[in-house]
Amino acid sequence: MIEPGEDQERAAPSALPPHLAPPASRASAASPASPGSAVAGGSTGTAGSTTAPDPVPAGTPPAGDTPRRDRYVDWLRAFSLIVVVVWHWAFTILQWGPDGPSPTSPLGFTSGLWILTWLLQVLPLFFYVGGHVHLLSWRRACERGVGIGTFVSRRIRNLAIPALALAGTWIVFGVLVTWAFGIEWMDRVVLLVISPLWFIGVYLVLIALLPISLWLHRHYDVLTLIWLAGAALVVDVLRLRYGYEAAGWLNMIIVWGLAHQAGFFYDRVVALPRRFDVAILWTGLFALFGLVYSGIYPGSMVGVPGDKLSNMAPPTFVIVALLIFQIGLVEVLRPSMEHLLERPRWQRVNETVNRFALPLFLFHTTGMAIWVALTWWVAGAGPGERVRPDLFWWLERPLAVAGALVCTLPVIMLFGRKWTARRPR
């Protein structure tokens, strides 16, 4: 998630230590480094063996160096956001029951469509990029003399205030409508609109844990990722083998925390030779294939109504494999995308989506609710009259996206301008 006023900048190549060098400095990246070398601090040696940390994290650009934006990072954030928003607009099916509306999706009706979720479930990638940007932002904060407490509190405030404002407004609106018109199912409508805020809730927890994750990264390096992956697997064993269902919710922090922590290694992944990018992609793909076809985990990377197990609520170890696959995929695609992002039109789209990322995410379900209400009112058709997606339903998907967008933009203009990010330098 892009927080208002947040910048992501990459240090000039000369400012980075060898193991963090970007592709332009890959020749220097061949110098030996110990497995436990620090990325965000000054510890060296084997894991667990540390020296006194530097006062400023390693990789902080010296004064006078001019950082440059990584347009591909901006694009990954923009693309991830667009996929999430368009998925909700295009593929949410509302069915009506005695208790009011409940959502479903075409995944529950169309055989084999779940394979698309291996590409379109982009939350692992979103958390991965978020971890990278937080590390860069922390380095820049260190240059300005900002402490970790101030750094964390500012980011929590930037996300929590608009999220709480939106949730509070809808809750008050739901209470008033229920009281005035006696609509008993209004609470379900409110829940549907604000339910995507769970993502911001997890993100806020990960921001609050930044002091711990940075410390682990500095002292234990890649071992932290191994421990988190192992913990996620242990939680699945407790849940799926021994029936401790409540334990599964630990993976809301462990799995997404792993994706966020992996973002601290973004520069090292970028510096790898291209054959390693392909290797990462195939490793994740084979892991996905093995886990899904083991019969233990479902194939869909999002929840499917009617399935006994979901890979998302709470996340399972399959999401770790999905993360590896997506990291490899974006690195394989990097040369082509970086070439496209040099074009002015792509740059404008990239900048615009990133600037309005937070209000777009916050208000996209509000716009969708307005659009659904308008279509029901204009068509004179009540909800739930057609649930199973037919040919006509698929043909009208572009209209569903366009209508929800048109209804969302005025809400952003009225209530979300204050939460737009400033233009990148």
Image (cartoon, rainbow, N blue to C red):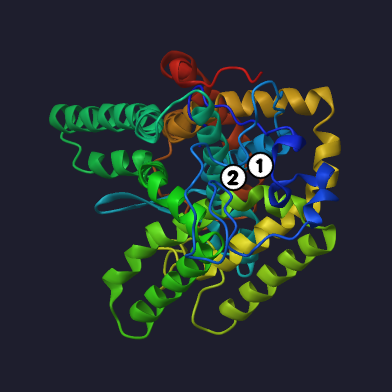
Is there a contact, CB below 8 Å, between mark 1 and mark 2? yes
Q: Amino acid at mark 2?
A: Val
Residue wearing tag 2: 129
**Res. 170 image quadrant:** top left
Percent from the top left, x then y, of residue 321? 59, 68
Pick whichever, 346 or 13, lies toward us. 13
Q: Is residue 238 above or below residue 356?
A: below
Q: Residue at x 73, y 32 (%)?
A: 12
Q: Residue at x 61, y 70 (%)?
A: 111
Q: Is residue 403 above or below residue 382?
A: above
Q: Amino acid at mark 1?
A: Leu
Q: Secondary structure at mark 1?
A: helix
Q: Residue at x 69, y 59 (%)?
A: 33
Q: Residue furthest front?
A: 51
The answer to which of marks 1 and 2 sits earlier in the sequence is 1
Pick whichever, 275 or 187, lies toward us. 275
**Res. 109 image quadrant:** bottom right
Q: Give me the C-alpha separation between circle 1 and circle 2.
A: 7 Å
Pick whichever, 136 or 65, lies toward us. 65
Residue 321 showing in the rendered view: yes
- Report whether 234 appears left or right of 361: left
Q: Which mark is residue 317?
A: none
Residue 371 showing in the rendered view: no
Residue wearing tag 1: 76
